[in-house]
Amino acid sequence: MLHDNASSSIAGRERSVQRDLRETVGGGIFAADATGGRIRTISGMDKIMTALSQTDPEAFGILQAESSRQHSTLELIASENHASAAVLEATGSVLTDKYAEGYPGHRYYRGCRQSDRVEQLAIARAKALFGAEHANVQPHCGTSANIAVYMAALDPGDTILGMDLSHGGHLSHGLRLNYSGIYYKAVFYTLDKQTELLDMDAVRDLALKERPKMIIAGASAYPRTIDFEAFGKIAAEAGAYLLSDIAHIAGLVAGAAHPSPVPHSTFVTTTTHKTLRGPRSGIVLCKNEWAKKVDSAVFPGLQGGPFMHQILAKAVAMGEAARPEFTDYAKQVVANAAALAETLMEKGWRLVTGGTDNHLMLVDLRSRNENLTGHVASGALAAARLVANKNVIPFDPRPPMQTSGLRFGTPALTTRGMKETQMTQIGEWIDQILTNHEDEDLIARIGKEVLEMCGVFPVPNQNTRQT
Ligand SMILES: *Cc1c(COP(=O)(O)O)cnc(C)c1O
């Protein structure tokens, strides 16, 4: 009962934050003042989006409010980031209009010369960035990329071995309700109960017992380095293909902050919008011998016309990721995660596996408060403008809509230019809120301080100009 009340009052506070934001978006986009938490104009979004603001004020208003939300909250969701203005411009470009079914040089429609150049650029950049023999840049998202690989290499009913969803895997790795679990026989490896780490001996035993046609390495909520080389050896021994799904860590791999799976894998898939910081999309990488099968699985197997605007935006993002600054960003993402993890652990919050090697961490809320759920905790944080998601932790007794854990990631904060100092501050705010999650005054006070920090570290992308 207590928790119902707590969560409904938190929902109320979230609503009031939303209302505050709405009230601030009358004539432009606003963010916090660097000093006083006052609201000031960052730019007139209507001066840039002249068409939308005039022809569809209703849609424009929603976009303005979202931009304002992003400016005035701190994004701790590990799978999110802030794409650059260049990526957003490519995403919103005239290539939206173009049909280009097929592949460069082999299109079903006329007028595809520039589309060919766009796709060739994206392919070349993907191959160079990840050191892959072949790249397909047409998948609309990470899940489509995975399905394309299954279609290229498997027959319905074949066995796939992936990481259990409740231990950090992804729904496209064999969940019963997903295509991957409906059309293939999915078996799962779990984490070690004691260490909460991947147990490569257990993975090997299971692979030799189940003899899957494909092993899937990669996760959505695993805070440690994944040993793709070990996965590769196990796959070879078990006679299985290895699919390494680097959706979460692609930016770390590109920025040399996580070992690359490419040399050890039959296939590598990724999203482009998480640590890689591009548009919302997907990519498949593989050896040349698989090129034809992968390409025809993506089109015409799975998709129709490619999204040429998204493909251009992927090319732009991979161009950014090839620059030296991106390596600095990737290193800082990891350093920031380590600093945030350190602060939380000093305050007595237990992290799954006792820390992090990458961009994310999982907090076991039971370590300080047996009754606090991820659902209630994330609501209290959101009321203070700290946006994170509830997450099941390994062997979690609570259901996915409640959870005993929270997941925090540092990619978006790092993109805003934050460093270890800010991570320590944010960790202290998180600790105070989780410790006093029903203290509305405290939450309001921290919300103001968060707003000030937002003003000092504005979101660098956005269709906005500083005025
Ligand atoms: C995010 C994610 C995906 C797919 O993401 P989409 O939402 O389909 O783009 C696939 N695999 C893993 C491990 C992920 O974390």
Image: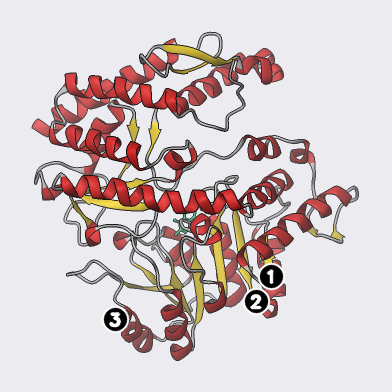
Q: Dots 1 and 2: beta carbons under 8 Å?
A: yes
Disc 1 to disc 2, C-alpha distance: 6 Å
Residue name at image x 56 percent, y 59 percent? 254
Secondary structure beneath dot 2 equals: loop
Q: Is residue 81 above or below residue 446?
A: below
Residue carrying label 1: 134
Image quarter for residue 11? top left
Please provide percent x and percent y for residue 47: 67, 15
SS for dot 3: helix
Amino acid beneath label 2:
Lys
Residue to which mark 3 is pinned: 202
For the residue pair 280 and 316, the one nearer the viewer reads as 316
Image vertical order of residue 141 relative to residue 202, above or below = above
Q: Are marks 3 and 1 in contact (CB under 8 Å)?
A: no
Whether residue 419 is visible to the viewer of this picture, yes or no, is yes
Query: Residue 157's spot in the image, x, y percent?
Result: 48, 77
